[in-house]
Amino acid sequence: MSNVLQAKERKELRHSELKQIRTNGNIPAIIYGTKVDSKPVYVSSADLTKTIRQVGRNGVISLDVDGSKQDVVLTDYQEDSIKREIIHVDFLAVDKSSKINVEVRLVLAGDAAGVKDGGVLQQPLHQLSITSTPDNIPQQIEVDVTNLQVGETLTIADILNQGSTFQINHENDEVIASILPPKQEDEINAGEQQDGGHPDNEEGRETTPE
């Protein structure tokens, strides 16, 4: 059951109009998709927050635009870096039976045995690309690392059983987590720690219609 979120079409696209929308407690948004014309709308900030709390970050929302309903998922948002307020959102129009590609957060759960022995836990992958129908997109994918020992590695192959309702778009041998022996920690820190990967915020995800 998707939650209904009221939206109003934006007729005026001037900058002053955007400011007015935000002043009134609303957020400008765009609805886009392969089968729909892009449409500028706005939604209530409070209602959006409430809806996301109910359906989750990757949940399907029934967007009611002036009486016409469309299933959407929240694909991206822009945040004011100072106030930490959402200032614009992108909604992808979806058909519940069609599969879409989405990025979902990968979370390591549990205290790894190897870390207790002094090893260093590395997590090279923080987002997983999956293909799924909108209703089956998980909020996040959790991987239990409790039994991971020093020198051991977890790969995509180890979590394929989680993808029963969705497809994981990564090579089976791609590393999710590994535990380095304690002595290697200094070498790692001396080298380049950043790989210039995703500076995007953790919550954000890129979504493309398939």
Image: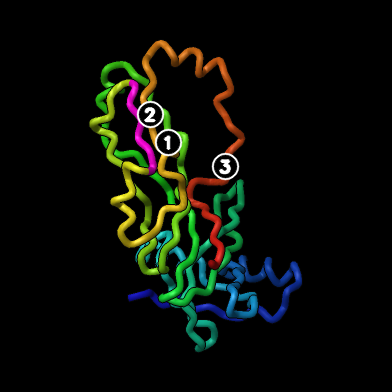
Q: Which residue is mark 3?
A: 198
Q: Nearer the viewer, mark 3 or mark 2?
A: 2
Q: Quadrant of residue 114?
A: top left
Q: Gap between marks 3 and 2, in whole Å?
A: 20 Å
CB-based contact (under 8 Å), mark 2 and mark 1? yes
Q: Amino acid at mark 1?
A: Val
What is the x, y in percent for residue 75? 53, 62
Q: Which residue is mark 1?
A: 175
User: Could you tell whether 192 is left or right of 56 in the image?
Assistant: right
What is the x, y in percent for residue 21? 63, 70
Tell me the number on the disc at residue 178: 2
Residue 158 in sight here: yes
Q: Earlier in the sequence, mark 1 or mark 3?
A: 1
Q: Amino acid at mark 2?
A: Ser
Q: Quadrant of residue 40?
A: bottom right
Q: Residue at x 46, y 77 (%)?
A: 95
Q: Gap between marks 2 and 1, in whole Å?
A: 7 Å
Please tell me which residue lies in front, 21 or 171. 171
Residue 25 in sight here: no
Q: Nearer the viewer, mark 1 or mark 3?
A: 1
What is the x, y in percent for residue 3? 38, 74
Q: Residue at x 29, y 35 (%)?
A: 145
What is the x, y in percent for residue 59? 40, 65
Q: Residue at x 42, y 68 (%)?
A: 134
